Amino acid sequence: MAPVYADHPFPLIQTPVFAAKQDPHAKVDSFDRAASEMANAHNLMIRGLNSIYLQAPHITAPDVKPFCRYIAAFTNLIHVHHHGEETHFFPEVERLSGVEGIMETNVHQHGVFKKGLHDLEDYINGVLADKQEYDGKRVVQMIDVFGRSLVEHLRDEIPTLQRLREVDGEGRKMAESIERIMGEEGESSMKALGMPGMLWCFANLDIHFEDDIWLDWPAAPGPVKFLYRNVFWWVYTDLRKFGSVDRNGKLRALYAVPKSE
């Protein structure tokens, strides 16, 4: 029987850096690198979403609340990521480009799936508070409402970042700054997530994605990565056991899905 991985049903995003490696004439610039950083962050969200979608119908009574906390960590990550974009990253992009509303389409997309995400969040909180009965089929149905729109948004943002080179004016201020401001937003988001949220991210970060070119991603200090993979991994077991990857960042069979599925 084949094991089940979190690489479906929602498809992962190819990074511009990897795409460029397939073309001997392609040149990678700061916009491609920034878009690839964003694609990697979005891919761990998509793997997390896939892991929830595929495991939800198979969760048994002892795992209901741990799994709901895992889902809650996912919804919180989406909120933190998009709050960081709307309050820091997007305004900085607009300022540097000099084009008012240049990221407005992306902000609008946040609103498209917002209600569906909140509905899932409210339901999960109800289960955790013993006000709702857990129903895995209901979780899947709720994701069906917003999942496609969420993943479409995560995908659309990548070429949007690449196209920013078209409005980079004299002095190339955006080319010089986009990776920096993305790093600042990422650092702020990591602090907002805290240890449990960051452990959730490591549990869905496939560093072997795209022929191992992301082995060193993210650009966090080595000791920090060591702590999450060798210390916190054993502390937050209820979060990481539902994750997409093992402690070494390698895609693994999902915990709750029977291999016959």
Image (cartoon, grey):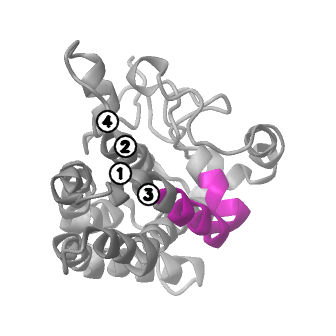
Q: Residue at x 60, y 69 (%)?
A: 188
Q: Which of label 2 and label 4 is nearer to you?
A: 2
User: How far is the residue under mark 4 from the one under mark 1?
Assistant: 18 Å
Q: Measuring from the top left, give residue 200's x and y in whole percent.
A: 60, 53
Residue 184 is drawn in which quadrant?
A: bottom right
Would you say the residues marked 1 and 2 are in contact, meaning their CB atoms lie under 8 Å apart? yes
Q: Secondary structure at mark 4?
A: loop
> Is residue 190 on the magenta stretch?
yes
Q: Measuring from the top left, give residue 211's x and y in whole percent.
A: 42, 17
Q: Is residue 62 visible?
A: no
Magenta residue span: 182-200
> Is residue 140 on the magenta stretch?
no
- Three-letter amino acid code of the residue under disc 2: Ser
Q: Which residue is mark 4?
A: 15
Q: Measuring from the top left, give residue 225's x and y in whole percent.
A: 73, 41
Q: Which residue is mark 1?
A: 175
In the picture as drawn, the residue positioned furthest to the front comes out as: 170
User: How far is the residue under mark 2 from the one under mark 3?
Assistant: 9 Å
Chain-order first, disc 3 or disc 4:
4
